[in-house]
């Protein structure tokens, strides 16, 4: 089956591990720490705080790891997606050293947890290779190895090519002692350890308000409250922040294909290139002992700013087949969302312009598994009142003057998206809309998002994102409405599935597919 023929997107992790089920929160509750988000960051934070003796609870809107954690490719690395020479430019040599040390510490922490809890999650230490094939920038690998070694990664080595691969990568950097695992097997075990240790987990529990201060609490859509001493928001992008953090990071969609290959035909390692958009590769067990799955991702673009996202799968397929002639059928395809901070480093710590007991973990910059873990370590230290030398580098309130150009570029892009209110065209005949597809159209001064379900019935809703009013666009890969400003996402019926928005798209009661005067559109 070709990638363009598939519509559903299910990651290999979702297909091979069932996560434990928990009940929704059904009453008020008192704990020491309430953690919003049941992915890698939230569950790791809950586990570490539980080990410190804190009474913790995790509240998750859907199922555990149902967000970006279930859509990762689970590379645990010191070879960061942002080049060390760029990190050094934005944060100085000391900042680059801290970045390297904190990511190494995160890998070590996962290894320690796996060993101490005896978790069977296919964890493996292996080498990683960064290559610059077709990169027009001169000396990019030389600059990177020099910066990485200044940051303390002394064992990074420059090689003539990635060894044993079927194609000539050209020169590459070898990063030793990287790591991979099955993220959902790891987190399923972590959730079990949290509840056995007295922690509480609630799924199907959508948070609508977060309040810090002396009487801190988290409120859910059904009015229940979790009263606590500290709140940690670990939802990929903060749902408790209206503007501050969202001006300093940008959402990108990233795409992944899983190809069946003969077992042993590609050396087991992590692979990355330096292109923009870039590619990243790892291997996973296949459906039989004779096969493996070659997982290839990349082809990122700004969320909501690609009219034909399905073409990204075709590009990955073409790129892969040109370099790995042993690939066979496509077994999996999925996409995810990456938050890219303007200066390359995550935002971890106290939420800007909020009470001191509200913490966030966001800005994964393509290194979500490692960032989530170091974020859990840092936030745990802050809540426990311990000093942590990483605090300044990841401080969410930091102002990165050296990243001003990137800040202006990203926010200029956001401002431009509001022009869709002017340029969006009137409705074309909805009879032409295919089943399972959506479109946005103008009706007078109003904007409507229309979806035709598999039965041919139409569903109408406001096209204005409930975060800051940007117009959503249709994502034909995930069957979702995506906001091109700050990355909020809604399912085909308008239900919010990803922040920063916390409210659903407003439904419209249109009784006909024919054009209606704008006064009849109650947005």
Image (cartoon, rainbow, N blue to C red):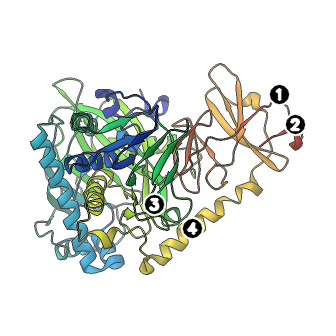
| Residue indicated by mark 4 | 411
The quarter of the image holding the C terminus is: top right
Label 4 neighbour load within 10 Å: few <14, some 14-19, many 20+: some
Residue at mark 2 to residue at mark 4: CA–CA distance: 35 Å
The tag earlier along the polypeptide, 2 or 4, is 4
Kindly indicate whether the residue at mark 2 contacts the one at mark 1 (C-beta within 8 angstroms).
yes
| Residue indicated by mark 1 | 512
Using residue 258 as the reference point, say whether residue 284 is left or right of it: left
Q: Quadrant of residue 436?
A: top right
Kindly indicate whether the residue at mark 3 contacts the one at mark 2 (C-beta within 8 angstroms).
no
Residue at mark 1 to residue at mark 3: CA–CA distance: 49 Å
| Residue indicated by mark 2 | 516
Relative image position of residue 291 (x, y in whole percent): 20, 28
Relative to 177, does residue 342 appear above or below in the rendering? below
| Residue under the image location 28 percent in, 70 percent down | 84
The tag earlier along the polypeptide, 1 or 4, is 4
Q: Quadrant of residue 162?
A: bottom left
Which label number is shown at residue 123? Answer: none
The tag earlier along the polypeptide, 1 or 3, is 3
| Residue under the image location 79 percent in, 40 percent down | 427
Q: Quadrant of residue 128?
A: bottom left
Relative to 403, does residue 365 appear above or below in the rendering? above
Q: Secondary structure at mark 1?
A: loop
The tag earlier along the polypeptide, 4 or 3, is 3
| Residue indicated by mark 3 | 213
| Residue under the image location 12 percent in, 49 percent down | 112
Residue at mark 4 to residue at mark 3: CA–CA distance: 31 Å
Residue at mark 1 to residue at mark 4: CA–CA distance: 38 Å
């Amino acid at each position: 089956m070709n990638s363009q023929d598939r519509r559903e997107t299910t990651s290999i992790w979702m297909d091979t591990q069932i996560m434990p089920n928990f009940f929704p929160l059904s009453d008020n509750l008192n704990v020491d720490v309430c953690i919003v988000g049941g992915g890698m960051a939230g569950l790791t934070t809950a586990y570490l705080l539980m080990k410190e003796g804190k009474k913790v609870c995790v509240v998750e809107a859907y199922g555990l790891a149902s967000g970006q954690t279930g859509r990762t490719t689970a590379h645990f690395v010191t070879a960061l997606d942002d080049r060390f020479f760029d990190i050094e430019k934005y944060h100085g040599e000391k900042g680059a050293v801290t970045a390297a040390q904190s990511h190494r510490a995160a890998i070590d922490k996962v290894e320690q947890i796996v060993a101490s809890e005896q978790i069977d999650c296919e964890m493996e230490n292996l080498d990683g290779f960064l290559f610059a094939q077709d990169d027009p920038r001169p000396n990019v690998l030389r600059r990177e190895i020099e910066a990485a070694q200044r940051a303390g990664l002394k064992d990074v080595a420059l090689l003539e090519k990635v060894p044993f691969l079927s194609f000539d990568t050209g020169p590459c950097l070898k990063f030793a002692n990287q790591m991979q695992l099955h993220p959902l097997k790891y987190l399923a075990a972590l959730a079990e350890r949290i509840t056995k240790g007295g922690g509480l987990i609630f799924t199907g529990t959508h948070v609508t308000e977060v309040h810090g201060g002396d009487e801190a609490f988290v409120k859910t859509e059904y009015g229940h409250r979790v009263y606590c001493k500290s709140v940690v928001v670990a939802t990929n992008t903060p749902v408790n922040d209206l503007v501050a953090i969202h001006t300093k990071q940008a959402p990108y969609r990233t795409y992944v294909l899983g190809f069946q290959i003969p077992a042993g035909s590609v050396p087991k390692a992590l692979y990355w290139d330096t292109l923009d958009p870039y590619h990243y590769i790892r291997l996973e067990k296949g459906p039989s002992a004779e096969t493996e799955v070659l997982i290839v991702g990349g082809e990122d673009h700004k969320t909501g700013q690609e009219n034909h996202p399905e073409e990204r799968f075709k590009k990955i397929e073409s790129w892969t087949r040109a370099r790995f002639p042993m690939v066979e059928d496509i077994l999996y395809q999925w996409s995810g969302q990456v938050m890219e901070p303007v200066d390359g480093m995550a935002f971890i710590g106290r939420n800007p312009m909020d009470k001191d007991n509200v913490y966030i973990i966001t800005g994964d910059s393509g290194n979500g598994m490692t960032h989530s873990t170091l974020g859990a370590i840092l936030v745990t230290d802050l809540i426990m009142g311990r000093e942590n030398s990483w605090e300044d580098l990841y401080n969410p309130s930091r102002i990165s003057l050296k990243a001003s150009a990137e800040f202006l570029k990203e926010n200029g892009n956001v401002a431009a998206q509001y022009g869709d209110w002017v340029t969006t065209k009137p409705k074309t005949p909805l009879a032409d809309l295919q089943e399972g597809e959506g479109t946005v159209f103008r009706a007078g001064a109003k904007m409507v998002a229309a979806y035709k379900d598999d039965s041919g019935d139409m569903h109408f809703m406001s096209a204005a994102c409930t975060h800051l009013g940007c117009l959503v666009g249709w994502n034909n890969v995930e069957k979702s409405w995506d906001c091109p400003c700050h990355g909020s996402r809604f399912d085909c019926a308008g239900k919010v599935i990803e922040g920063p928005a916390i409210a659903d798209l407003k439904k419209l009661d249109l009784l006909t597919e024919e054009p209606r005067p704008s006064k009849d559109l109650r947005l």
